[in-house]
Structure formats: structure tokens, C-alpha cells
Image (cartoon, grey):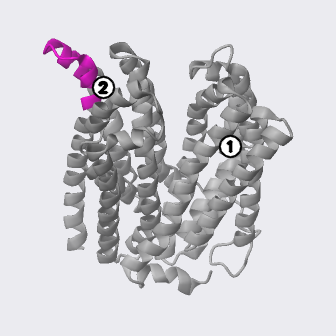
């Protein structure tokens, strides 16, 4: 893609740009969420319940590995958008080189550490004597391919920032489709079990990486590989890592929140309470992935126009993204308040579980219509390189608000003579409300600054 195509980020209608860049991201994110469901179905039917439990145990470990990939990929993609806005194409190429080098180094380190301490890590995440075999078989293959996974996600982020959102989407859909096709072949036909499912994931990513490399080897692209670029630049590395620190910490915090929440639900409730949370959270996750696609579309537009000091266009893109995210999350809110039984029955036909989940689901979702605003605001700060504010917003909801509320609200309810389990459920919307107010205070101040410049 030539320079003219990139400069459209600073000249084309913001509304059209957001639609053009966000739609591929939304499709890709939706495909990824559907892939996770299909992958679990194949393992459950092809290997058995214990294998599915082993995969569940392995998932938090995979999420932590993915968080380290986010540390590099998100930070670098934000930085390259800013460099393109500044017409600093040489630095943008250096960012590309650093993405590949850092992902290779980080992926190698995680692979070595993970393989060496694999069993203790899996036991810490809840593996038993029955499930450890399946979890180990799956993660061994995933860890051996970890370098490839990191490079795949890193280059995919770069494609969006350099004006190739559709190619980024196609690469993601290609990986997802191949995974779905290869899963039954490796699991059923070749009888490889859980290892087959993991191998299908790695092979699918390899094919997508090859497609991405073909794009970046094209000398007609403004950003492309060439032999003089392969060096670590400390300034770029530190800048990219500082920007990517916010989503990285958000991933880690999310894992910790689930651990604390599950323990509190078991303490004041039972296994049904955890099932209720799991069902509601899965439904939330589907809509959150759509908002993430909107954020991906906003990121290069905001980064480019911030770099070129076109703050009016930057603000317009942010407001459109907030409006779009709010509409998406309002649909989730309507489902949750009007007909929660509908989405609960998508996951279970157990009448007792359905009945006991309706009221807690309504509580968890009661302010969900507003949560798109702080999500987009945090990503906005990441997109313009304001890492500290992005980190602050990323951690306020989960670490500063949600965890203390999960721990404290049941005690308060108990002292008031109420069911402490409801203290756990109400901690969710209270945390969301505080997160919205915090984001509003922070962004309002900065928006006044941008109007003055």
C-alpha cells in the first residue's frame, strides 16, 4: 500500500474510515469468539469430558501467554500509527522490525519457562491427577509454537495500523477457518486427541503468518521488510512496551479477578453460582469482542491524526467509537434486563440453573449499557501513546474497584442481615458505575486540552 492510501487516515471522512476499519475487526473478533466455542465442542466430543476439563485448566495459562503478545503487538501498532501520522516512515519500518524481534525473543522465553515448569503451573490453575495429562499434552504443543503465535498476532496488529484492516481480517478468518477444518481431521481421523487440537491451532497460525509475511515483503508497501532494518532500537522498544503495558496488565488483572470471584462464589454460594457467572460472562464476552473490533478500527485513525496534530478528527473518531460501543452494549443490556432466560438457555437446559441464574444475570448487566464508554476511553489513551492513563483506566475497574468490592460487599451484606452472595453479584454493577465516572472525569479534562491546541 502506498503513501496515498495511508494518508487517507488524515483526509477521508472519519465516519467512513471508522466503518471501513472497524467492520473487519468486528468480523475477526466475532470469528475468534465463535472459534473458541467450536474448538471446545470438538475436544469435548472427540476426546471426552476430562479432556475438555483439561483444556479449561490450560486456558488461563494461554491467556497469560497471549497477554505477553499483547504487550508487544498493541503498543507497536499504536506507535506505528503515530509515526505514519508524522510521516516518519523510517521509524515506522523500525517499529516493524522490533515487533518481529521482540515477539521472537519473548515467545522463546515464555516457551522455555512454560515447558520447564509446565506441571506446577497447570496444578496451580486447578489441574487434577485426571486432567493434568490432557492439559499437559495441549500446552506442550501450544508452547512449542508460541513464537509463531506471537509473530502472528504482532504482524496482524501492524496490518491494521498501516491501513490494511481487510487483510488483517482475512488473515484472522483464514486461521479460524483452517482451525475448524483441521480440528476434526487431527482429532477424529488421525486420532491425535488433544495434541491434534493444539497442532491444528499452530498449523492454522503458520499459514496466516505466511500470508502476512508476503504482504510485508512487498517493497511497494510504505512499511516492508528490508535487510538494513534488523536491529533493536531501545527507544522504540521501551515506547512500544510502555504503551502495550495497559492491555497487558488488563489481561493479567482479568485472570486474577476470575480466581477471586470463583472463590467468593464458592464461599457464599455453590457450584451453581459459578455456573451462573460462567454463562453470563460468556454472553458478555461475545459483545465485548464486538466492542474490541470497534476499538481496533478506531486505533489507527486516532493514532494517525494525533501524530499529525489533527485533533478535531481524532476527537470525532473517539466520539463515534464511544457511540457505537454504547449501542452494542445497550443490546446486551436489553437482553439481560428484558429476557435473560433467552441467553441462559443457549448454554443450559437445566431448569434449576436457569431459574437461579435469571436474577443474578439481571444484576450483573444492569449498567452494562454504559460500560462501552470506559472501554473505548482506555483504548483511546493507548492509541495516542498516553500509557500511564491507559494503565490507570485499565486497572481501576478490576483491581481498584472490583476486587475490593467482591471481597468487601459480602461482609457488608452479612452485617446488614442480607444474603452475602448478593453482595458478590452487586459488586459487578457498582464497579462498572465507578469505572464510568472515573473515565468521564479523566477524558473531560483532556478533551478541553485538545480543543485549546
Q: List the residue tagged with mark 2.
A: 406
**2 or 1: tag closer to the N-terminus:** 1
Question: Is 419 a magenta residue?
Answer: yes
Q: Residue at x 40, y 77 (%)?
A: 308
Res. 17 image quadrant:
bottom left
Q: Nearer the viewer, residue 192 or 319?
A: 192
The segment highlighted magenta reads: 409-426
Q: Residue at x 15, y 12 (%)?
A: 415
Q: Image check: 119 left or right of 413?
A: right
Magenta stretch secondary structure, dominant: helix
Q: List the residue tagged with mark 1.
A: 107
Q: Residue at x 42, y 66 (%)?
A: 298
Q: Image check: 357 left or right of 1?
A: left
Which of the two discs, 2 and 1, sits closer to the camera?
Answer: 2
Q: Image check: 72 left or right of 211?
A: left
Question: Is 135 a magenta residue?
Answer: no
Q: Image check: 245 left or right of 104?
A: left
Q: Position of residue 242 (x, y in %)?
A: 47, 50
Q: Is residue 305 above or below residue 182?
A: below
Answer yes or no: is residue 389 visible: yes
Q: Quadrant of the N terminus?
A: bottom right
Question: Label 2: how many residues lie within 10 Å, few (<14), some (14-19) or many (20+)?
Answer: many
Q: Quadrant of the C terminus?
A: bottom left
SS under mark 1: helix
- Distance between the Cα atoms at labels 2 and 1? 34 Å
Q: Residue at x 73, y 34 (%)?
A: 46
Amino acid at each position: 500500500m502506498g503513501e496515498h492510501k495511508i494518508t487517507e487516515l488524515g483526509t477521508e471522512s472519519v465516519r467512513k474510515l471508522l466503518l471501513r476499519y472497524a467492520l473487519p475487526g468486528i468480523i475477526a473478533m466475532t470469528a475468534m469468539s465463535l472459534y473458541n466455542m467450536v474448538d471446545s465442542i470438538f475436544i469435548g466430543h472427540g476426546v471426552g469430558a476430562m479432556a475438555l476439563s483439561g483444556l479449561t485448566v490450560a486456558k488461563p495459562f494461554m491467556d497469560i501467554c497471549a497477554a505477553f503478545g499483547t504487550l508487544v503487538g498493541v503498543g507497536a501498532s499504536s506507535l506505528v500509527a503515530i509515526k505514519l501520522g508524522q510521516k516518519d516512515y523510517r521509524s515506522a519500518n523500525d517499529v516493524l522490525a522490533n515487533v518481529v524481534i521482540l515477539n521472537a525473543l519473548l515467545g522463546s522465553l515464555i516457551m522455555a519457562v512454560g515447558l520447564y515448569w509446565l506441571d506446577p503451573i497447570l496444578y496451580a490453575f486447578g489441574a487434577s491427577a485426571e486432567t493434568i495429562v490432557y492439559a499437559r499434552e495441549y500446552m506442550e504443543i501450544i508452547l512449542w509454537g508460541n513464537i509463531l503465535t506471537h509473530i502472528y498476532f504482532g504482524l496482524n496488529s501492524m496490518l491494521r495500523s498501516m491501513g490494511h484492516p481487510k487483510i488483517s481480517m482475512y488473515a484472522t478468518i483464514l486461521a479460524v477457518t483452517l482451525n475448524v477444518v483441521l480440528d476434526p481431521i487431527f482429532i477424529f481421523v488421525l486420532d491425535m486427541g488433544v495434541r491434534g487440537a493444539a497442532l491444528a491451532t499452530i498449523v492454522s497460525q503458520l499459514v496466516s503468518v505466511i500470508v502476512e509475511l508476503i504482504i510485508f515483503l512487498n517493497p511497494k508497501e510504505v512499511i516492508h521488510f528490508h535487510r538494513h532494518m534488523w536491529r533493536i532500537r531501545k527507544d522504540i522498544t521501551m515506547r512500544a512496551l510502555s504503551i502495550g503495558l495497559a492491555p497487558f496488565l488488563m489481561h493479567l488483572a482479568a485472570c486474577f479477578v476470575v480466581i477471586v470471584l470463583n472463590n467468593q462464589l464458592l464461599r457464599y454460594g455453590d457450584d451453581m453460582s459459578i455456573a451462573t457467572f460462567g454463562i453470563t460472562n460468556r454472553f458478555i464476552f461475545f459483545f465485548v469482542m464486538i466492542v474490541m473490533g470497534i476499538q481496533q478500527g478506531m486505533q489507527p485513525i486516532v493514532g494517525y491524526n494525533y501524530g499529525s496534530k489533527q485533533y478535531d478528527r481524532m476527537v470525532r473518531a473517539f466520539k463515534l467509537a464511544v457511540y457505537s460501543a454504547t449501542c452494542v452494549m445497550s443490546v446486551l443490556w436489553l437482553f439481560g434486563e428484558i429476557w435473560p432466560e433467552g441467553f441462559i438457555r443457549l448454554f443450559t437446559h437445566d431448569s434449576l440453573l436457569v431459574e437461579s441464574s435469571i436474577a443474578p444475570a439481571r444484576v450483573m448487566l444492569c449498567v452494562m449499557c454504559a460500560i462501552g464508554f470506559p472501554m473505548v476511553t482506555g483504548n483511546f489513551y493507548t492509541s495516542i501513546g498516553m500509557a500511564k492513563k491507559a494503565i490507570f483506566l485499565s486497572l481501576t475497574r478490576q483491581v481498584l474497584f472490583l476486587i475490593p468490592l467482591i471481597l468487601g460487599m459480602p461482609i457488608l451484606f452479612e452485617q446488614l442481615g442480607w444474603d452475602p452472595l448478593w453482595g458478590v453479584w452487586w459488586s459487578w454493577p457498582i464497579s462498572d458505575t465507578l469505572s464510568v465516572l472515573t473515565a468521564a472525569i479523566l477524558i473531560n479534562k483532556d478533551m478541553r486540552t485538545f480543543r485549546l491546541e
